[in-house]
Every structure is written in C-alpha cells, then in structure tokens.
Image: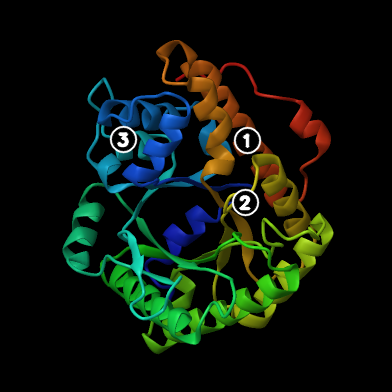
Amino acid sequence: MTAHPLESTVAALLAPGKGILAADESLPTIGKRFAALNIAPTEENRRAYRELLFSTRHLNESISGAILFDETTSQRTGLGESLPGVLISRGIVPGVKVDGATIALANFPGEKITRGLDGLPERLLRYRELGGRFTKWRAVIAIGDGLPTATCIGANARLLALFAARSQEAGLVPIVEPEVLMDGNHTLARCEEVTGLTLQAVLAALIGHRVVLEAMLLKTGMVLSGKECPQQAGTKEVAAATLRCLRRAVPAAVPGVVFLSGGQSDVAATERLNAICATGAAPWKLTFSFGRALQDAAMKTWHGAPANVAAAQAALLHRARCNGLAVQGKYSAEAERAGPPSGTAK
C-alpha cells in the first residue's frame, strides 16, 4: 500500500527521543501567566518570549515540533526572520492551534464544545503558506456529578473528526486532542472510564469521517486521579491505567500518542511519562506535547527581562532534555539534578 503523503511529517514529529513544544496559549491564557509574574501582556512581550523559546540552541535535540498560536505565525524576530522560519531553520516542524474558544454546550450545564470550524479551510491554506505542517484542535471533557454526558462526548468527537478531515484535505497533519480535565475529586478508575469512553467515541468519529489514521496523531492526557481526590494514584498505577485505557480504545493504525501535561507539575509529568514509556509495550510511538510543564521554569526565569534570556533558555533546554530521556524510559533523578546546561544562548 502506498504511504500517505503526510506520513513523512508524522515521522518527523515522532522522531526518537523527541517531543512537541506546545507554545499555543491563547491571549487570555498567556496573559494570566504573564500577570502572575508582573509581565505586561503586550504583543511585543509575547513575541519576545516565543522568540526566546524557539531560538534556544540545541532545542531540536529533544523537540521535534512546536505548536503556535495564530498571532505567532506572522510575527518576526528582531532581525526580521519569521518565527515559523526560526523553527524551520533549526529543524523543528511548525504547527498551529486552529480551534477557537470553548463555549457552553446548550442545555448541558458544566459542559463545553469548541468553536473554530467557520472559515477553517481558508485558514488552513494560510497556515500552510506560512510554513505550518500540522494542526491541533482541543476539546475539553469535564468529570463531575452526572458528567460527562454522552451528548457532550459525541458533539466534541464529531467536531474533532471534522477538523481532522479538513486538515488532511489541506495537506496538514492533524493532532486530535480530547482532554479529560484533571479538575475534580474523581478517582483514577473514574478517569480511566471517562477517558476510555471519550477516546472510543473520538476514534469512531474519525473513522466515520474517513480520516486517515496513519496520517494523524492523538494528543491525550494521562489517566490520573482528580486534583482534589484524597487518594492520589502512584506513578506506576498511572502508567498501568493509561496504557490499559489506550490499548482498549486506540487502534494500532494511529502512529503516535503525544501526552499533554494538563496541569501537572513539570517534574511529575516527566516522571509519569518515563514510567509509561519505560514499559516498551505499546503499538504506537509514545511521546509528549507539553506546554506549561515545559515552559514554567523558563517563563519564571525570564520574567520579562532581556538580561535573563540565556538563563531562561537553559531552563527550557533542561526540561526538554529530561522529557526526551523520559520518552526513551531513561529519565532519572540524576538527570533531573544535573540542572540546566550552559551555552544555550541563541
């Protein structure tokens, strides 16, 4: 059977020992993170921060791709190079978050769907012209009393499938992200149940919309106890539940599963990723697509000051390298203690 033309991009994103940097925070989200550090939420500060991330030396040794927010696709460095071009020149594949804001699902209190299908074909063509080679769409599923409903799961599954079909039609690899939120006091078992039901619905919708599974990636959360659950599952329990859930719901035709961090601390996310990948017993390639768990230390170190750029880049590179080791099941406390490397300035 002839390989799908998008499979080369999939292979690049799933390069051994590498993962994806999610730098696609919306304006309100990055604004909140800046505000917590007393950084002015201006376009120039957002541009400078993302230039800091993308221009980190040796980042491509652990990062295969980066997800951009719409604003970032047309921004340029102080020297005039486009930010997608910075990534391309460093061997990192640029992609774009193409969904809009989540909105309340009518008649279903506490549940949401994601906007963004209007005008999507035209936007996809523009992103490809700007250098994008993959896309991402996020849906959120909340766990609570009577939640999620089958209606919410089904509605989000259909939207994810329509997005994925449009992306492939435009020559872009879709990253399909149904995120089961950590918020709540639910148990590990309840998270596993909901994640399984969600993934089953999403994969059925993808197949129903004739999405080529071999030319997409699945981005999902690890199976975790809710943040407020009094009984927090251990790392080994998380790994076992996550793999069991994925095996029951995700066909082997899907080439890769990239985990989101979803509010976990940076070290906890790396430890759990390492435990999952160390088993070596999965039909798909497993890696990461972390946002906050990759960036937190870098943003706090930068603090909006140009003098802190090199130190912030070192912090980013350290986290990226730790997660690159975790993908191989080789992360250790010694690797964590090694700390940020030197010589990372752009």
How far, Cα to Cα, is label 3 from label 2? 25 Å
Circle 2 sits in a helix, a strand or a loop, which is it? loop
Residue 80, by quadrant, is: top left
* Closer mark to the observer between disc 2 and disc 1: 1
Three-letter code for the amino acid on which mark 1 is drawn? Arg
Q: Residues within 10 Å of mark 1 (few under 14, many from 20)?
A: many
Circle 1 sits in a helix, a strand or a loop, which is it? helix
* Closer mark to the observer between disc 3 and disc 2: 3
Q: Which residue is mark 2?
A: 16
Question: Would you say 154 lies left or right of 257 here?
Answer: left
Along the viewing direction, whichever of 91 and 232 lies nearer the viewer: 232
Q: Residue at x 32, y 43 (%)?
A: 27
How far, Cα to Cα, is label 3 from label 1? 21 Å
Q: Residues within 10 Å of mark 2 (few under 14, many from 20)?
A: some
Q: Residue at x 82, y 32 (%)?
A: 334
Disc with the residue nearer the chain's start (3 vs 1):
3
Question: How far across and down, in percent of the image, does residue 120 sit?
Answer: 22, 65
Extreme top residue here? 307
Above/below status of 252 relative to 15 = below
Three-letter code for the amino acid on which mark 3 is drawn? Leu
How far, Cα to Cα, is label 2 from label 1? 17 Å
Q: Which residue is mark 3?
A: 83
Residue 30 visible somewhere in the drawing: yes
Above/below status of 65 relative to 217 = above
Q: Residue at x 37, y 37 (%)?
A: 31
Q: Residue at x 47, y 76 (%)?
A: 213
Above/below status of 274 relative to 145 = above
